[in-house]
Amino acid sequence: MINRIKQEGYSILMEPKDVCIGKDYFVRVGFCIGPIGEEIEFFQEK
């Protein structure tokens, strides 16, 4: 998904990375700037 966003010319604020929330809740997150300047978060449970 992030590669497609880059191809369309949008800015990536944070490349996707794996993080742990709490003790054992793992997720992958990333951020970009949308077409009207909004910040978009990508969030995937692992």
Image (spheres, rainbow, N blue to C red):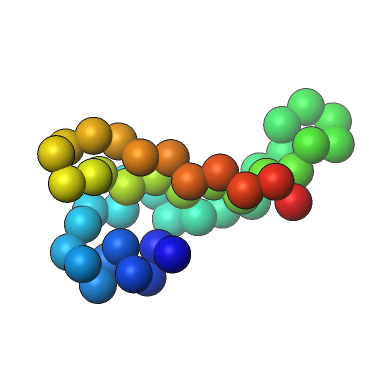
Residue at position x 40%, y 63% in the image:
2
Quadrant assignment for the N terminus: bottom left
* Residue drawn where x is 85% and y is 36% of the image: 24
Is residue 41 shown left or right of residue 44?
Answer: left
Residue at horizontal 14 percent and vertical 39 percent from the top: 36
In the rendering, at what x and y percent does residue 7 appear?
24, 72
Give whichever of 14, 32 is nearer the camera: 32
Q: Position of residue 19 (x, y in %)?
A: 66, 43
Count of picture labels: 0
Left or right: 26, with 40 as reference point: right
Q: Residue furthest top?
A: 22
Residue under the point 30% across and 63% down? 5
x, y (%) of residue 43?
56, 44
Q: Quick one: which residue is furthest to the front in this view? A: 36
Please name whichever residue, 31 or 4, is drawn nearer the observer in this view of the structure.
4
Say which quarter of the image contains residue 4.
bottom left
- Return the residue nearer the eye: 44 or 26: 44
Residue 45 location in percent, x, y? 70, 46
Q: Is residue 1 above or below residue 21?
A: below
In the picture, measured across the screen, residue 21 lies left or right of residue 30, that is right
The residue furthest right is 24
